[in-house]
Image (cartoon, rainbow, N blue to C red):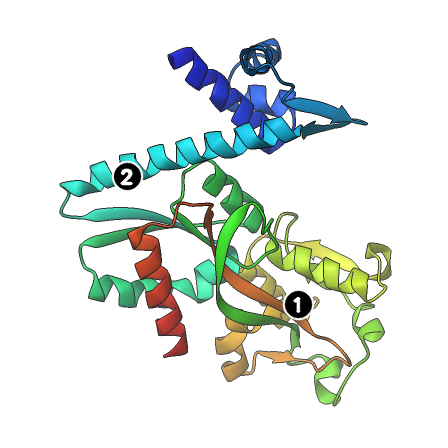
């Protein structure tokens, strides 16, 4: 029974990462062991579970069914484990993941209000980019995630917290701030300070520019930085500009150290979404999501 469970873990991991090498590394086993585990399950069930489409590894229809059912078993196990650990504990502990803009500028105030209302709930916050947060959610290291980037909406359950807008942000010294409006082509000739690969902000920005007909070669990436505070500091010194969430520059706009430049036909909008593993919505999640939406609306 234990070996069957181990083989199911191997198959489930392979189905997620789509790579024998990465599966072996993640589980700290050899690649032949990964192949043997999958082959054992295929022989046991009498069906093929994986297939190759070109160089791409895919699940067969039977593989998709098994993946879904194993996911439900793991989800139930995590829920039971979490409930039992919290059952007799005075302090209930939950792990929340948030992407960088949300983690720095939106969620701290919500967590402060939540803690006052629910003093026996300890919400442990982890902040990273969208890619890393979703990876930790997949691995069961987070109970709930709050992301600003794109994600697979078929893979997760989710609900909207609020809408957000990315705006062209410049130093208050920049000549563009004296103009009523600027064309996007003009803006893209300036030094763009952009977030790191894997960042939701970067993914959405690049997707938007591509839809507008601008390939990466068309804009001047001056720096790639994973820290929003550092990006804002560089902009203040007029070393470049960036597309930044309105949430992240409220204080700087009040201080007038940064300014939003109106760009003709620019509209980079996105959602801040709560995301969780399918069919794992707990009482805590429901309460925290409801509280957060109320705190934002209020």
Establish if 9 lies above or below 229. above
Residue 237 visible in the displayed image:
no
Q: Look at the picture and state if 135 lies above or below 272.
A: above
Can you name the residue that lies furthest to the front here? 46
Q: Would you say 124 lies left or right of 209 here?
A: left
Q: Which secondary structure, mark 1?
A: strand
Give the mark count.
Answer: 2
Q: Are marks 2 and 1 in contact (CB under 8 Å)?
A: no
Q: Give the SS element for disc 2.
A: helix
Q: Quadrant of residue 110?
A: bottom left
Q: Residues within 10 Å of mark 1 (few under 14, many from 20)?
A: many
**Residue 223 at what x, y percent from top left?**
70, 55
Q: CA distance from mark 2 to mark 1?
A: 39 Å
Residue at image coords 21%, 61%: 118
Q: Residue at x 79, y 73 (%)?
A: 187
Asked if one can make out residue 111 in the rendered structure from this viewpoint, the answer is: yes
Q: Which mark is residue 82?
A: 2
Residue drawn at x 61%, y 27% is 62
Q: Is 222 drawn above or below residue 30 in the view shown?
A: below
| Residue 243: mark | 1
Question: Few, some or many C-alpha atoms within 10 Å of disc 2 (few <14, some 14-19, many ≥20)?
Answer: some
Q: Earlier in the sequence, mark 2 or mark 1?
A: 2
Q: Residue 207 in the image: x percent, y percent?
A: 73, 59
Name the spot of residue 213 as percent of width and height, x first.
86, 64
* Quarter of the image with the C terminus in it: bottom left
Q: Quadrant of the N terminus?
A: top left
Q: Judge by depth and name the residue closer to the eye, 13 or 238.
A: 13
Residue at 36% from the left image edge and 73% from the top image edge: 294
């Amino acid at each position: 029974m234990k070996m069957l469970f181990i083989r199911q873990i191997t198959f489930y991991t392979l189905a997620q990462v789509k790579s024998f090498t990465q599966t072996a590394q993640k589980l700290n086993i050899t690649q032949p062991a990964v192949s043997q585990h999958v082959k054992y399950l295929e022989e046991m069930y009498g069906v093929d579970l994986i297939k190759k489409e070109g160089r791409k590894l895919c699940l067969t229809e039977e593989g998709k069914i098994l993946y879904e059912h194993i996911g439900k078993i793991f989800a139930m196990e995590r829920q039971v484990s979490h409930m039992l650990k919290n059952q007799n504990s005075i302090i209930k502990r939950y792990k929340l993941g948030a992407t960088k803009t949300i983690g720095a500028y939106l969620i701290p105030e919500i967590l402060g209000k939540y803690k006052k209302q629910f003093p026996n709930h300890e919400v442990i916050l982890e902040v990273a980019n969208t890619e890393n947060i979703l990876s930790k959610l997949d691995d069961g290291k987070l109970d709930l995630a709050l992301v600003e980037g794109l994600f697979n909406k078929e893979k997760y359950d989710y609900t909207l917290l609020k809408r957000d807008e990315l705006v062209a942000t410049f130093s208050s010294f920049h000549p563009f701030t004296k103009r009523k409006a600027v064309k996007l082509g003009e803006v893209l000739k300036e030094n763009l300070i952009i977030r790191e690969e894997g960042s939701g902000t970067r993914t959405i920005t690049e997707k938007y520019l591509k839809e507008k007909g601008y390939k990466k070669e068309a804009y001047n990436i001056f720096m790639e930085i994973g820290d929003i505070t550092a990006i804002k500091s560089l902009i203040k010194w007029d070393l470049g500009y960036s597309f930044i969430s309105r949430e992240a520059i409220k204080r700087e706009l009040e201080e007038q150290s940064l300014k939003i430049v109106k760009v003709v036909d620019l509209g980079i909008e996105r959602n801040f979404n709560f995301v969780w593993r399918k069919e794992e919505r707990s009482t805590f999640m429901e309460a925290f999501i409801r509280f957060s939406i109320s705190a934002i609306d209020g």
